[in-house]
Amino acid sequence: MTDSRAAALLLSTALATASACSAPAPRVVSPAARRQTEEAGAGLRYLLHLPAAYEDRPSWPLILFLHGAGERGDDLTLVLREGLPHLLETLPDFPFVVVSPQETQARRWTPDGLAALLDEVAGKYRVDRGRVYVTGLSSGATAALELTIHHPDRIAAVAPVAFTAIPRDLCRMKDVPAWIFHDAGDERVPEGRAKKLAAELRACGGEVKLTIFPAEGHDAWTEAYRTHELYEWLLRQRR
């Protein structure tokens, strides 16, 4: 069985288990009960998820997750509140290495800084450098796009969720597949901006998927990160 097929089977089992669980994960998780560990590298503190079967394979795909403005600070517990890190507390078999750095109020992320973190993590853990993906929510989604624009050779796919701004020089990421998620009733960022981003990337020749959820509010990430097809799509992308 190929690595991609094996990962897809693990993914199916992991997400089915999460969906079958009637009680949601707690919004605040005590340190002793956390599945993700606190690590540091390239000047950033981050949460690390390793699949339960990590030792069984020589390499794993990696997802870099970038949080929104509400999770900035010096307490990594904040990063567990929303998005993929929140979901991972119920998914020990999730078949990706996941790195979730925290942006502080004093030091904001830069594309070069995030690329340095990816390099350090790939050198330390069993990472398939050809299958490195980036996603984020709100301002973190914009940071994910900026990283992809500045380092398109490092990223196999990008999935911005409820992004806040369209960065410059989009055509530099035209060779990186993108899946954009947004809510139709987002009061902070109109859905038209998501459609504009998709249109501009397509005009550059990019491969783009766009999903607009028929929901109100800015929170498109709860639904996006529970979308099984997103992870299957990521697993099909390779540099």
Image: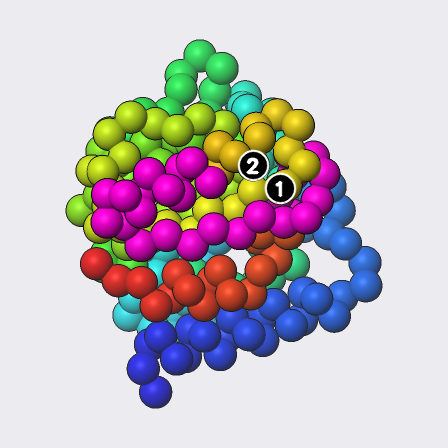
Q: Which amino acid type corresponds to the residue marked 1 in the rendered image?
A: Asp
- The local secondary structure at tag 2 comes to helix
Q: Name the mark nearer the viewer: 2 or 1.
A: 2
**Residue at coordinates 42% horizontally, 54% vertically from top-left?**
209
Mark 2 and mark 1: span between their CA atoms?
A: 7 Å
Residue 36 colored magenta?
A: no
**Picture quarter with the C terminus:** bottom left
**Residue at coordinates 27% horizontally, 43% vertically from top-left?**
203
Q: Which amino acid type corresponds to the residue marked 2 in the rendered image?
A: Glu
**Picture quarter with the N terminus:** bottom left
Whether residue 227 is visible to the viewer of this picture, yes or no, is yes
> What residue did someone put label 2 on?
191
Q: Residues within 10 Å of mark 2 (few under 14, many from 20)?
A: some
Badges 2 and 1: C-beta atoms under 8 Å apart?
A: yes
**Residue at coordinates 34% horizontally, 27% vertically from top-left?**
167
State the residue in front, 40 or 70. 70
- The local secondary structure at tag 1 comes to strand
Residue stretch in magenta = 195-222
Q: Mark 1 or mark 2, which is nearer the start of the sequence?
A: 1
Q: Residue furthest bottom?
A: 1
Residue 94 position, x and y percent, is: 51, 64
Residue 213 colored magenta?
A: yes
Residue 70 position, x and y percent, is: 60, 25
On screen, residue 33 versus residue 56, left or right, reads right
On screen, residue 203 versus residue 165, left or right, reads left
